[in-house]
Amino acid sequence: MSASEAAHILETESQVTFRFSDGVEYYAISKPGELLLDVARKNDVPVTWQCLTGSCGSCICKVQEGEVSSDTGRLLSLLPSEAKEGLRLSCAALADTDCVVELDYPSTFSEDHEAHQDTGTVTELEWVNYNTVRLVMELPEDTEFEDFEAGQYVQLQVPGTEEWRSYSMSSTVKELPEMTFYIRVLESGVMSDYLRERCQVGDQIPVDGAYGVFYLREEKVPQIMIAGGTGLAPMLSMIDTLRQNNFRRKPVILAFGCSHEKDLFALDELSMRSDWMPNLDVRTCVSRPEGEWDGNHCRAQFAITADDITHEGTQAYLCGPPAMTEDAKARLLSLGVKAENIHVELFESL
C-alpha cells in the first residue's frame, strides 16, 4: 500500500465521541461503512442495545456534532420528528464525518442494569376487555432478576415456539418476583394465538431483560404521561413507583386514550391510584365514542393543555402507536415542553 493510499484510508475514517448524560466521554475510530453500535461494542463503550435490527429503540443516540446517516434499508423504530431532531439508532447509523453523539443515560447504566434470563410461572390470566389480557407471572424466589427501571420492558418467549416478544411491565421492582403485563391480543400473531388459545395458569414462560432506555427520569418536577391502548402498562409502573417513593409535591398527569369505550381497561386501577395520590390527575379519553361518554372526547394528546406546563423541567412520557406518539410529541413541543424532556416508547403488538 502506497503512502497516498494509506493517507486516503485515514481520511475516510471518522472519530466518534460517545458522550453520556453524566459527562463521561468515550472516543473511538469508525471505519467507512461501520455501524456506530459495532464501533461502540468493539471499543467497550457501555451503550445499551438489544435487538440489533432497529426495531426496539434501545440503542438510540442523538447527534450533537458532525454528520451521521441512517441505513434506510432497515425498519427503524424512530419517529420522523426524532430523525429530524438528530436522533439515530446506533445499530443502523453510520458516521459520515467526525461526530459527537449523546446518550440520554449515564455511563454506568448498562453495568447497573445487566439483563438476566429466568423462567416465570403464569399465576393469573384475566381478560380485561375484548382484546386485552392482564398476565401475571411469578419468577423463582432465588431469581437474579432483581432490578429494573419503571418503564422498561422484557422479552417473553412464546411457549412451544422459538419466538420472543417484548412487553413493558405494569408492575414495579418492589413487586418482584411477581411481574404483571397488559397485552393486546390480535386476530393473529404468535403471542396472541398462545394467549387466546393455549395459555393456562401454571405455564412456564422464559423471561429475558430488562431492556430499554424508556424509564422514569427526574422525579422532582411535574410529570406528564400520554398512553394509547396497552401503552398504559409502563405508565402504571411509573405512577406506582412515584407513589412508592412518596412523590407528592408536583403534579402527575396521565392522559389515557383509546378509540372506543370498549377498548378501555384498568379504569378501576386508575381510580384507585387517583385516590392514593392526590397529585395524580387521570384524564381518560375516547376519540370515537359510540354512545354516552362522560370522559374526554378527544385523542389523549389533546387532553393536555398549555395550563398543564407549569415548570420548564416538566418530563413527558409517550407510549402507544407511532401515529399517536408522533402527534403527541408535536403537541407537547408546541406547548413548550423541551424536546430533551420528551421520552418516547413505541410498541408493536404481535
Image (tube, rainbow, N blue to C red):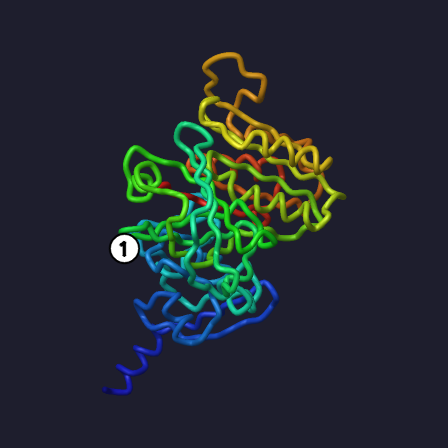
Front-most of residues 247 and 118: 118
Q: Residue at x 42, y 62 (%)?
A: 117
In-image side of 39 versus 139 (left or right) = left
Q: Can you give x and y, in whole percent of width and height, for residue 48 in the image?
A: 46, 63
Decide if residue 189 is in sight here: yes
Question: Where, by quadrant of the figure, is residue 279 drawn?
Answer: top right
Label tally: 1
Q: Residue at x 40, y 48 (%)?
A: 202
Decide if residue 326 is in sight here: no
Amino acid, disc 1: Glu
- Where's the C terminus, which quadrant? top left
Q: What is the residue that sits farthest to the right in this orientation? A: 249
Q: Residue at x 56, y 28 (%)?
A: 302
Front-most of residues 87 and 257: 257
Is residue 298 depicted above or below 32 in this figure? above
Q: Which residue is mark 1?
A: 162
Is residue 250 depicted above or below 113 in this figure? above
Crowd around label 1: few <14 · some 14–19 · many ≥20 (10 Å): few
Q: Can you give x and y, in whole percent of width and height, for residue 72 in the image?
A: 30, 52
- Where's the N terminus, which quadrant? bottom left
Question: Where, by quadrant of the figure, is residue 308 drawn?
Answer: top right
Q: What is the residue that sits farthest to the bottom in this orientation? A: 2
Disc 1 element = loop
Q: Can you give x and y, in whole percent of width and height, for residue 349 in the image?
A: 37, 41
Front-most of residues 325 and 72: 325
Front-most of residues 175 and 330: 175
Is residue 7 depicted above or below 307 in this figure? below
Q: Can you give x and y, in whole percent of width and height, for residue 163 in the image?
A: 29, 52
